[in-house]
Every structure is written in C-alpha cells, then in structure tokens.
Amino acid sequence: MKSLILPLIILMNLVLSCTQPTGLTPIRAVIELDIGESEEITLNNGEKVRLTLMEIEVDLDSLRNAIRSVNVKVSVDGEEVCLGSGNYHLPVEVGNIQIDCPVVKNYYTNSNSDRWGLTKDARFRLWPKGSSYMDPGTFVYPVKQKWFASMSQSGNEPPYVDWGEDPASKEIYYHSGHDFGGAEGMDEIVSATDGLVISALGDTLEGYDDFPGDIRTDVVWILTNLGWYIRYSHLDSTDAAIRTGASVRMGQRIGFMGKQGGSGGWVHLHFELKTRETASGNWGTEDAYAYLWESYVNQYDPTVIAVARPHHLLWTGQQTILDGGKSKSYAGDIVSYEWAFSDGTNAEGAIQERSYTMPGEYSEVLKVTDSKGNVDYDFTVVQVYDRDNPDQTIPVVQAAYHPSLDIKPDDPVTFLVRTFNTEVGSEIWDFGDGSPQVSVRSETPDRQNYTEGKFAETVHSFAEPGDYIVKVERLDEAGIRANAHLHVVVND
C-alpha cells in the first residue's frame, strides 16, 4: 500500500503545480500621490523618475453632480503634462516614461462604493518609454468581436446603457472594469490570460476566502500569472471545461456573452482586473482599457482607431463638448475629423460644441482619416433630459450585430436591438446600403425581471465590400427619439 501512496502524492503535487499560475511581475509601476507631493519612482527597467502631482480639476454635470472628465497636471522630471482619468484615456508619453492616471480621490465625493482602494489624491501607473503595457504573449483580447462593435462602459464612466442615467440619482456608480456590449449567446468570450479558475457557476475553490467581488452562476473569476483576479460577468453560458480548480490557457473559451446577473438587462461582458497592489492593501480595480487596446492592436493590426467616447448627459439647451482627440493612427497622422450629427448637420475638427433642444438619446458619428487614407468610425451617445420636465424618462436603445469580424459580401449578419423605457412603437433599421428599412419589435424589458425577454433580431447581407454605418431608432409614446449606430466593415 505504501508503494502506491507515495507515487499518488507525487502525482497530486505535480497536477497542483501545473494548475497554479506561475509568478510574473507587472511592467507598470504604481504610485499614489497627494497634491503637492513629489516622489522618485523606480521603473520596471531600473530607471528612476521624479513625479510631482501639481493639480486636479474635475468637470461636473449639472444633473447628477457626477464627474464627467478629469484634468490632472503632473511634472515628470520637471516636464509638465496633463492627464485624463479613466474614461477611454490611454497612457501619455512624456520624458522617458508612459503614464496614466486611473483614478483620483474626487470620485469618492459621491460614489456609491469604493472600487479603487485609493488612499491619496491620485493613483498613477508608469511604464518605460517604448515598452508594452503587458508582457508580450501573456494577454489577448477577451472577446471575439470587432473593437467598439457595440456600446460600452469603461473605467469611471457612469453607467448609461439600459435604463439610462437617472437625473434624480445623486449617488454615482463610477464604472469599474470595462463593459463590451454584444450579441446574446453569440459573441464568444475567451480567457485573456493563462490562469486558475477560482470561481465558476457559483462555486469557489477551497482556500480562496479573500475574494474581490461577486460569486454568481453567471460569473467566472480567474487568478492570473500576475497574481491579479479577472472577472468575466453576465455570461449566457459557461464552457464545460471552466470549473473551479481548472487551469485555463490564454485564448481558451470561457463562454458566451449574455445578460444574466446584475446586467441591467443589456447584453454585455463585464471584464474587470482586481489587485491588492494598492497603498491601502485593499482590493482595487486595475483599469483594463490600455491592456485591452494593446491586445486588440496586436491581434488585429488596425491602421487607425476612432474614439468618440465616453457618453454625455445633458439638460435640453445645455452645451457639451464632443471630443474625438483620443483617436489614433498606426499608419500615419490623423488629418481629418468629420462629425455627422443627428440633426443632419456636419462639422470638421476633433472638438465640437453641441446643445440639444429636444430630449432623447442621440448617437453622433465620428469619422477619422489618417495621412495614408485609412478611415475608421466611432459614435458617442448623448442622453438629453427635459430641463422643464426632469422626471420624464427617455427611451434607450442597445444595438449589436454578429459576426463583427471577417464579414464578406453576401454573408448573413444578425442584427439585434432592445429598447428600454417604452412599451410602444418599433425599432427601425437602416443598413446604410440603400436597401429598404426594416421594422422589428423587441420585447419590453421589466425592471424587476430584466434578464427576461429577447432582443429583436433581423438578418441582413451586404452586397459590396465597404464601411457601412447602420442606424436603428425608436420613438416612445411622447414622441421622444432614441437612436444608435453600428459600424460594419465588409471585406473583399
């Protein structure tokens, strides 16, 4: 019997060692500073840099008193630079570093919870100049989907997709993690990293009691080689191989996108990185946007990416600034920013000032062109409430399509839509190719049972290659309009 026990123990230890993530060190260095504080930081490559936090300015809306944008002024070895905070901002290159500011303490003023574990006025991440954000070959894009294929919610952006923002609600959920909108049961989710499944289908691995978030049947938690936890939420289904204690490989299927759990009723993947590498030692969100951007660029090699996000929240008659300046070309310089607005007007230039006389949900189209003639499109959502009738809701449309990658002429593409806050009317699709419009009717979401009900589906094919701007809209009982756009690329 003893001769059998010893090999069995050796075999069990070997299996356990194979399932435990191997240790890696993040490339980025992290520092928290108070305003006026200066500190020398050692980078991943051993170089040192002195960082000083000089000033923080925040822009608040007049509806919820929510932070909409942040301007953080820092000095890097004496060179001053301004940074945004979350909200689709990539790291900025200055001196011998790349730097971003994931969060500032101002968000604590009216946040409904602490998702950052921040102890000082601002947190910064620093990478050596020219380095990747993540070790090459260790992180992939977690959705088999085109970049910005649907609506999204990124770090620090107040959620707005589903029932819309409520002007009366003054406690803000500044979004943690990154939400990818998509097609229910169709868009495949894969593991961004190698790792160990800590929780799946509501079950948690024994010995992992200190946990950074929800344990639900629609959520998978994976411990990565960096010691970070990754959350994949709202799954429509989970792959049979994804069970607690299982090792996963980068790119392995986790499941399919859905609207289960606390989704609010819109189909999306909530993707979030959690770490204890905070000054407080508490769990904090590691903003994922830069890592997602880098992994997408590495895998799909886009020549140019248009960025018109985040969304906007306004009163009628109030002005806002639309900004396409976060767009980026990898083939040349961006030479043109063209906006097509919901009222039929057009404008040129990255920065545009707009106001709206009627309540509703507007989707404004940005087209960027680089010096090599490459083109991309993105959309920013503007939700407008009636200043004279602040309790009036507006309809909110979520649209998606599948597949969004490698579409060829005559390929069938499924378009899906759901409208919130109204029980009348139908959604009208315009596919942007001169074909007749199509009318569908999605099931009305129920606030108490928002995971129930289906998105309305229709299938369309495009006869020719090209860039198509697809539009869908719906009117509510008061005649208030909501619309959304999708950018469909059909290849030769």
Image (cartoon, rainbow, N blue to C red):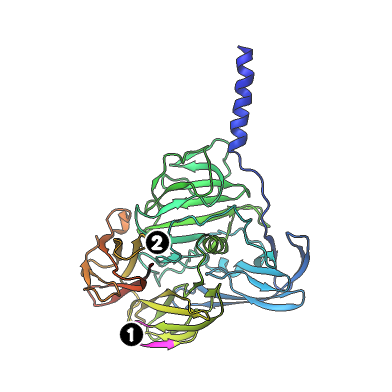
Q: Dot 1: few (<14), some (14–19), or many (≥20) neighbours within 10 Å?
A: few
Main SS, magenta region, reads loop
Q: Position of residue 28 (x, y in %)?
A: 67, 60
* Element assignment for label 1: loop
**Residue under label 1:** 343
Residue kind at label 2, given as amino acid type: Asp
Q: Would residue 187 appear left or right of 57 to someone viewing this image?
A: left
- Residue drawn 59% across the image and 52% down it: 138
Q: Position of residue 27 (x, y in %)?
A: 67, 58
The magenta region covers 341-347
Q: Residue 404, located in which quarter of the rendered image?
A: bottom left
Task: Tell me whether circle 1 and circle 2 mark residues in contact (CB < 8 Å).
Answer: no
* Element assignment for label 2: loop
Front in this rendered view, residue 359 or 168: 359
Residue kind at label 1, given as amino acid type: Asp
Q: Would residue 67 appear left or right of 362 to someone viewing this image?
A: right
Marking on residue 406: 2
When the figure is inspected, residue 383 is found, relative to residue 401, above or below; the finding is below
Front in this rendered view, residue 429 or 272: 429
Q: Where's the N terminus, which quadrant?
A: top right
User: Does residue 342 show up magenta in the picture?
Assistant: yes
Q: Nearer the viewer, mark 1 or mark 2?
A: 2
The answer to whether residue 53 is visible is yes
